[in-house]
Image (tube, rainbow, N blue to C red):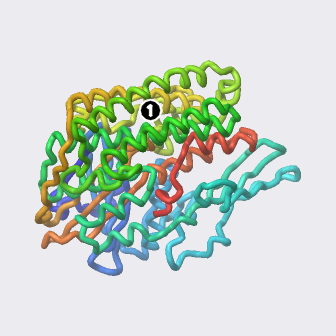
Amino acid sequence: MIAHLERDTARLMRQPADFFGELKERLRANDRVLTLYSTAASDPGHVTLTAVTTSGVNLQVVRTELERSWGYHSLTRKFPALHIFEREIFERDGVPCHDHPWLKPVRYPPGAPPMAEYPFYKMDGKELHEVGVGPVHAGVIEPGHFRFSCLGEQVHHLEIQLGYQHRGAEALLQGKDPRRAVPLVETISGDASIAHAWAFCAALEALADVKVSPAATLSRGMALELERVAMHLAGLSGMMTDIGFLPGGTSYGRLRTTAINTSMLLSGSRFGRGWIRPGGARAAMSAEQAVTVKANLELLVRDLAPVNALVQDAASVRRRLQGTGTLTTEQAQSIGLVGMAARMCNLAIDWRTAPGAEPYTALPIATVTEPGGDCWARGVLRIREMDASLRWLREAVARAETLEPKVEPLAAWAPSSLAVGICEGWRGEVVYTVETDAEGKVVHQRAQDPSLRNWLGLALAVRENEISDFPICNKSFDLSYCGNDL
């Protein structure tokens, strides 16, 4: 969707003091950090830090090389949005991050302290008690441990311990031919296969200087919006089931089948796997299939309208969701929330509206925001985003008429370059970076799911709520465990 290429990465290097000074200056100017990560330097005793920031739609990249044993002074106290990146750098490369207020494990890679030794935050008080939930949960959900500090039924603090899903997915990418890596990328967070595949391919296409045809880009957009509709339907079904509003739960669940079956019709996979490949899109739509796709979209529009009205008019739904799990706009901005979690706090972060974000420049889509910041806002946002996606899909299918599989070959990579690929998935921005050396060999590939940045939002949203509100809050954020754990 968005690709950014930096050639001659040597010119991005700064002295450490200049790197941190420049980063702080950009963040003080309200630029937003897109990613901050570490890679091995040519000297084993050093590590390279790379920061990518954005001011609106422009990306800026700056790098530095640090002596590994010395580390650096944390910026998290002044810029809390950096907290998870600094924790990741410490865990990945053992770089000391002095004065970090919350330097705790993220994923437990080999050599990390045992998970049983996680340093949970402790609150004192004779009447306070702790409640531990997970990592094994009722139902078919991913593993994660939630430690609540409560006074009676009221939650004063929630700490979320993840890492149980760590599979070494990012490590598997290293040394692998990127052209063959998309099936792996599609499983990093399986319910966002399209978003991950598109962001990764965008970075590769920038490195290979390959332009994807408008038809293939439109095909990718159809895949992404079908994924958004399907996962919003799944999320709304879960939220309605959690509050016992079964007409909503069953209807949304039923309609999700129509959305994922449409993806299967065009790509052979209900999750859209195989739809996007470097250089193009492999999905096909004949004129006969287009008739079925249009009928499916019409069915979704027709059947969703009364369900959405029923949900939004129900006093029981409003009573249960309004005011539950609230985050303020200031909190969301401070900790760097992205995607749906940010938009429900009235932050209009949406890469689909960025200039050059095809196919959304040729066929625009509206960014939806909600000001409430609570579970109600997260539910309504999903309803409105589905409506916007379905309008977009109907127009896209009408324009395309048919789809032909078309994939441009990717030959050589640009040497000494760093490519950034971004895709606004249903959860938020998925970010991939791919770097080459002076011979044009890919030397590093990095994946970043939006959940990495949004888990802290859930922990803050639950405070001052009753512990029984947690399942609704958790489902309303709908974050990925495996996308965080990699």
**Tag 1: amino acid:** Leu
Give the residue drawn at x 26%, y 31%: 396
> Is any part of residue 34 visible from this angle?
no
The residue where tag 1 is placed is: 347
Q: Nearer the viewer, residue 90 or 313?
A: 313
Position of residue 426 in the picture relative to residue 332 (left or right): left
Give the residue drawn at x 42%, y 60%: 188
Q: Nearer the viewer, residue 115 or 289?
A: 289
Q: Nearer the viewer, residue 238 or 452?
A: 238
- Quarter of the picture containing the N terminus is top left
Query: In the image, is residue 289 above or below residue 407?
Result: above
Total numbered labels placed on residues in the image: 1
Position of residue 222 in the picture relative to residue 80 (left or right): left
Residue 104 percent location from the top left of the image: 57, 64
Residue 155 percent location from the top left of the image: 74, 44
How many neighbours does mark 1 have within 10 angstroms: few (below 14), some (14-19), or many (20 or more)?
many
- Quarter of the picture containing the C terminus is bottom left
Helix, strand or loop under label 1: loop
> Is any part of residue 126 visible from this angle?
yes
Toward the right, the furthest residue is 126
Residue 212 percent location from the top left of the image: 16, 47
Quarter of the image holding residue 361? Answer: top left
Query: In the image, is residue 39 above or below residue 396?
Result: below
Query: In the image, is residue 263 above or below residue 368?
Result: below
Give the residue drawn at x 45%, y 44%: 427
Give the residue drawn at x 73%, y 45%: 156
